[in-house]
Image: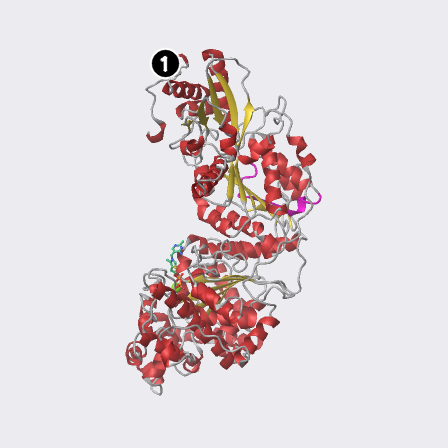
Amino acid sequence: MESEFNIEAVETQKCLDSIDYLLRYKGSGAAERLVQSLQNHVGLKGSPVAMMPTTPYINTISVDEQPEYPGDFELEKKIRSAVRWNAMAMVVSANREHEGLGGHISTYASLATLYEIGFTHFFRGPEAESGMDHIYFQGHASPGNYARAFLEGRLNEQHLRNFRQELAEGGGLSSYPHPYLMPDFWQFPTVSMGLGPINAIYHARFMRYLVARGLKPKAESEARVWCFVGDGETGEPETLGQLNIASREKLDNLIFVVNCNLQRLDGPVNGNGKIIQELEGVFRGAGWNVIKVIWGSDWDELLKGPHAALLIKRLGEVVDGQFQKYCVSPGSYIRRDFFGKYPELLEAVSHLTDVQLQKMTRGGHDSRKVYAAYKRAMEMNGKPTVILAQTVKGYGLGEAGEGKNISHQQKKMNERELREFRARFEIPISDEDVVDAPFYKPKASSPEMKYYLEQRKQLGGYVPSRLKEPKAPKFPGTEFYQDFYGNTGDRPISTTMAFVRVLTKLLRDKDLGPYVVPIIPDEARTFGMEALFRQVGIYAHSGQLYEPMDKDTLLYYREEKDGQILEEGINEAGSMASFIAAGTAYSNHGIPTIPFYIYYSMFGFQRVGDSIWAAADSRVRGFLLGGTAGRTTLNGEGLQHQDGHSHLIASTVPNLYAYDPAYIFEIAVIIQDGLKRMYQDHEDVVYYLTLGNENYDMPDKPEGSEVGIVEGMYKLVKSSKKSKLKVQLLGSGSILKEVLRAKDILENQFDIAADVWSVTSYKRLRTEALAAKRWNMFHPTEKAKQSYLEKIVENETDVFIAASDNMKIVADQIAPWIPGGLFTLGTDGFGRSETRENLRRFFEVDGECVAIGALYALSEKGLVKKEEVKKAITKLGVSPEKVYPYCV
Ligand SMILES: Cc1ncc(C[n+]2csc(CCOP(=O)(O)OP(=O)(O)O)c2C)c(N)n1
Ligand SMILES: [Mg+2]
């Protein structure tokens, strides 16, 4: 036994010596390769060893590898302290004046150094040769950004005073990064946890796409995407769920900085474990380069000392909850509880006072360590990098909240706490003034301001900032769309096919085509778009490294380095991130790419609604296409697929125009209008179109219908029947077909004339009607305004009935403006698998039910006898006792 142990020890030592040798003469890459070879070797011998996903709980970059610090510590500290103070003062004064305004102090307090090093040494501005870096700032650290912009002269004292009072005179500052509210300042809305990280990944990839497609020149030194993430935020599936995409795409232009203050809102992120280690494993497993910045320089000595191995062991043993406890404890406790576990460690810190022990910093507050990490991240080749930086939540707040569980919510400071804060960061504010928490700006002539502003100048100007409007590409005129205005003859098509025809033609346009970005989450074949694979190719950064199995066919799966399609795989969240990247490129890159994102409509608003909201906030311009929509139109797929409510959710997004077109000419007119508004008139709007997969004949475009199609409603057929009774039937999407059937039933079987309207957008009709009504409310003595809807229905005195493949409430949106009210039919309830015919009867939106609805509405006005309606129900073969589809 004894001798066996010795053999193992001897052999182990040999291996370690080899590693040391390689480390000394060939660097860490060579050592890593040796370990890898050992692992492979053992695996081949039949006893595979699992790779350890983590490294010891110390900094990745050793002191010996640390680069020279190029900055001026003292001047940087002065600037950082001023920003810290103002960020705190902004929140404190807002909440003093108006209880409940809210805001966060502690997040920025933990981030200050992580931001500072970036702003002073790394983040490149709009004038930089590489182009601007794109930085996703932690949402609730916004006071830090505002405080810095104040020093830069981009915001004034009044702005700061009006933090979270956006309606105040002179303008205020939005709570969080919202490009919609501060369009000259913010680029990326990040405060919905998880959306910043996923959007950052796809943004970094889209930057590569722009270069690969020749839309953006390849700069010698590439711009970076930086994303600051909270450690609590890593709990969101969107944060970690797409890490593999970043490594698959070799995004070395992407740097995540996770601010590991070990706390989230309620308490510790992983009190019983170690979030930094957990994240290291996840990121490394996903193929990222991981740089841990855990300890500040005052740990260097101990970590090089004779008991380093034991200290590292101890650092690895202690869980996060306990490290948090050390933040709020005196040095004597730390000595006893942490170092005291091993007598050797106790001895190792015997020369340090309790105060010194208590002040030993975490890596994320040490400029040298952070600088080293950022520099290495910038030098990384072939992989994205994550920096896991340990910080203290509420750093510098002392008793007011440093490291405390209540820290996140802290928005007030009393006089004593303010004095302490001032003293700790040496802010030159007098004793009398400090209680008012005034803002502090060092003089423009001070060395620190000169230094900082010069650094920003060297780095190319201020960030964040939004770029100016780019030049619009040349747009095809109306003649381009003529192809789509005629009837489809005896070749019925679906609206999805119709859209694909329009898109295909747009892609072929020599001026506009290159800017079109088709985005598809593994659904191209569903939508009949596979011809595009061949026509414009699928973007793949490495091209096609295999021979596609269908190479000898016309429509083979063609991946290309400069492919145009973003084929995202089964990934609606990632596709939305691409949509946002492409739809904001006009502002972020000065390149007006036009995204057309087509997906199963059920997996749009319902699944990634928050991303759509963020897209709208981001001022995205582009088209969302909800394919295979309609609760009864997509018939076989059943409950989880059949969408009858995306138009309802779409109605909640203010700058989004939602259309439910029925015909190819409607689609062509809507897309033409959208392109003009977004890319020629520079309106920040999104167009949403639902598309169906039912084939039917499409008629000629009625003369002069363009305005109505865009405004949301036009008369498709005026009845030629002479009759005492008349109804106005409103239909949308594929149910327009059923409405036309109802017209025939009513006219032929019941002698009731019926006009038919196509309603393309209930949302738009309602929005404009509401605007007119509101104006009238405030201008009661002036001539009342009339919306488009009111104008077109004012002379129609008949009964109105609406039917669509959506919930009834979608059509009900316009009911208040319909003379005599609106009777609505729709598809409320869970979908199910059936034939279209049966489904439409089930949901009561087929021609027969629409006709019954019309008769009933007439009877309600006393124009038809109730008895007649009863007879009609029987005549049309509908069971009055059929189940109520909403809740069976
Ligand atoms: C999707 C979402 N859920 C919840 C919140 C509310 N929220 C804001 S900040 C926060 C805690 C953030 O903790 P962490 O990410 O660790 O950031 P820290 O402030 O500690 O840097 C929570 C829960 C949110 N903004 N977004
Ligand atoms: Mg945190």
Closer to the camera in the image, 518 or 322: 518
Instruction: Please tell me how crowded label 1 is: few (under 14), some (14-19), or many (20+) other residues with Cα within 10 Å.
Output: some
Which contiguous range is marked in magenta? 510-525
User: Is 307 drawn above or below residue 662 in the view shown?
Assistant: below
Task: Check disc 1 and report the residue beneath it.
Answer: 865
Q: Nearer the viewer, residue 18 or 247?
A: 247
Q: Is residue 97 magenta?
A: no
SS state under label 1: loop
Q: Quadrant of residue 89?
A: bottom left
Magenta includes 515? yes
Horizontal and vertical percent position of residue 834? 43, 26
Q: Amino acid at mark 1?
A: Lys
Quadrant location, the C terminus: top left
| Foreground residue among 570 and 109 | 109
Q: Is residue 14 visible?
A: no
Q: Position of residue 66 (x, y in %)?
A: 52, 77
The residue nearer to you, when weighing 51 against 634, is: 634
Query: Does any portion of residue 156 appear in the rendered image?
Result: yes
Total residue callouts: 1
Location of the N terminus (image quadrant)? bottom left
Please, which residue is most extreme toward the bottom here?
351
Q: Residue furthest right?
A: 510
**x and y percent of residue 807 in the render?**
41, 32
Residue 650 vs 463, above or below: the answer is: above
List x then y, in percent, for residue 630: 47, 32
Q: How is the image coloured?
A: secondary structure
In the image, the residue with mark 1 has its CB under 8 Å from the nearest atom of ligand 1: no
